[in-house]
Each structure stands twice: as structure tokens, then as C-alpha cells.
Image (tube, rainbow, N blue to C red):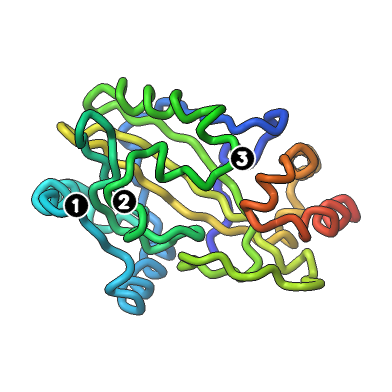
Amino acid sequence: MSNVPREDLLPRPSGGRFVVGAKAIAEEQWLPADAAMLRERTMIRSAHPAEVFACMDGWGSAVADVFDALPADTPDDICVLGRVDGRWVLVGGELCFPNRWVLQEKIGLPVLDIHGPVPTYASQVGAGVDSLIERLADGRIVERSNWSISDTGDYFEPRTPPPIPDIDPARLLLRVERQTLRRLGDVVVFSIRTYMESMERFRGRPRDQVEAFVQVLDETPAEVRAYKSITTYVEPLRAYLRSF
């Protein structure tokens, strides 16, 4: 288990809207080492060798160059975006910590289509994300975070499991992805660092952080709750977080 290390990565209220919230970071902040997560990554690679890597035909050399340029001990998932017919598409990557999506099913898709199942993505931020990627200067790095709730604690979860009836809210976990985008020559590198923190531990955080997340739960639209597969968990979790 790798608890969320920074307060600014935690979910914050946004009026129920999908917000990109990308900010620039320095080179030394890009892919910090994490020995525990690297061990987890190594175990998943060994357990799922045919599922964690995929590459689009004709992009093998470019994708290999990206991985050769990265630190050998990075614990982040790495996806590579390349220009195909004027659009940025997913051309390759290694995904050891999928949060209910399958890498092989997304290879060759433009960024907007990759996020097709995400409610409100296209209408609220689709064009903005495409513009952000297009305008990335070579070497500039931007960071954002995304959240979900895990009921299994599995880092490797490419498919969405059915909700667990009457689960103790203390057993749920806040799953946070620290995501970065960086242009490297002709490609863009999308990194994903995954953290999971038990709700039992999260409930002990400063009350403003807990209340902020409760507000996020309150304002999350019904269709987004359904997409995240958290509909049945919201009410019990809200009560649990406020019972401390």
C-alpha cells in the first residue's frame, strides 16, 4: 500500500465538473524513485507478462527509445502518444497498474476516443486536453491528479469488478493517480503514478482534507458515480468519514 504522499494530489471540490488542473513541474519532480512501488511493478510484470505492454505497428523503435531514455527504476506506468494523421494517439506503453481499462484495447486511439466512456470528458475538457498536448514545448512537464475508489485493493485491475454488497467503508481505498505529460522530441510521454490509501487511514487526516473529499463525493454527478462504479458506496462512505 502506498499512501497519497502530498495533500495537493487529493481530490478537491470542483462543482461536479471535470477539471484538468494541470500545473508545470520541474525536471527533478518528474519520476521520483519509490522502491516499494517498483517492487509491486516488478511482481505484476512477472504475473501478467502478456498484458502489461502493447505497441502500435510501426512504432516499436520510437516507443523503445522512450523507455531507453527513462530511469530504469521508475515505478510509473508509461504511455506514449504519437502523431498519426494529425492527431495524438496512443502508440505504445507499459501499464502495470490499470484502473479498469485495458491497454491493448486503447492502442491506436486518439486521446479523445480513449476517454470516450468517461462521462462529461468530451464536453468539458476534451478540446482543452488536446490543446494542452499540442502546445507542450519540448521538455516542459505538467502534472495533474485523478481519483477513484477501490474496493479490492488490486493495483492490476484492467476490468471493472461488480460492487461488493454491504462492504465495510473502512475497507474501501482512495485510489489516486499522479499523472504527468512531457514532450520528448516527436512523442509525448504520459506517466501515471498510482497511490492507494485505506479509508480507515484517510479518515484520520486533517478534517479539512476529509471534508473536502466528502464534498467531492456529494457533487459527483450520478453518471460519473456509475462510471467509477461507486454509486452504492457514496452514502455509507460519507457517513463513515463524518463519524470520526
Please tell me which of labels 1 and 3 falls first in the chain.
3
Number of callouts? 3
SS label for mark 2: strand
- Identify which amino acid the numbered label 1 is placed on: Phe
Q: Can residue 21 be seen by looking at this rendering?
A: no
Give the labeled residue for mark 2: 78
The relative height of residue 20 versus residue 158 in the rendered view (above or below) is above
Q: Is residue 19 above or below residue 75?
A: above
- Picture coordinates of residue 38, whole percent (x, y): 36, 63
Question: Looking at numbered disc 2 in the image, what kind of residue is underneath it?
Answer: Ile
Please tell me which of labels 2 and 1 falls first in the chain.
Answer: 1
Q: Position of residue 198 (x, y in %)?
A: 67, 62
Number of the label disc, if any, that sits on residue 154: none
* Disc 3 packing (10 Å; few <14; some 14–19; many ≥20): few
Q: Secondary structure at mark 3?
A: helix
How crowded is the residue under tag 1: few (<14 C-alpha within 10 Å), some, or many (20+)?
A: some
Identity of the residue drawn at 35% across and 36% down: 181
Question: Is residue 22 found left or right of 10 in the rendered image?
Answer: left
- Identify residue for label 3: 7
Residue appearing at x 80%, y 41% in the figure: 218
How far across and down, in percent of the image, does residue 216 sit? Answer: 73, 39
- Give yes or no for contact between labels 3 and 2 (Cβ–Cβ under 8 Å): no
First in sequence: mark 3 or mark 2? 3
Who's the residue at 34% across and 45% down the image? 31
Give amino acid for label 3.
Glu
In the rendered view, does 89 fall on the left or right side of 29?
A: left
Q: Is residue 186 above or below residue 95?
A: above
Location of residue 229 by image quarter: bottom right
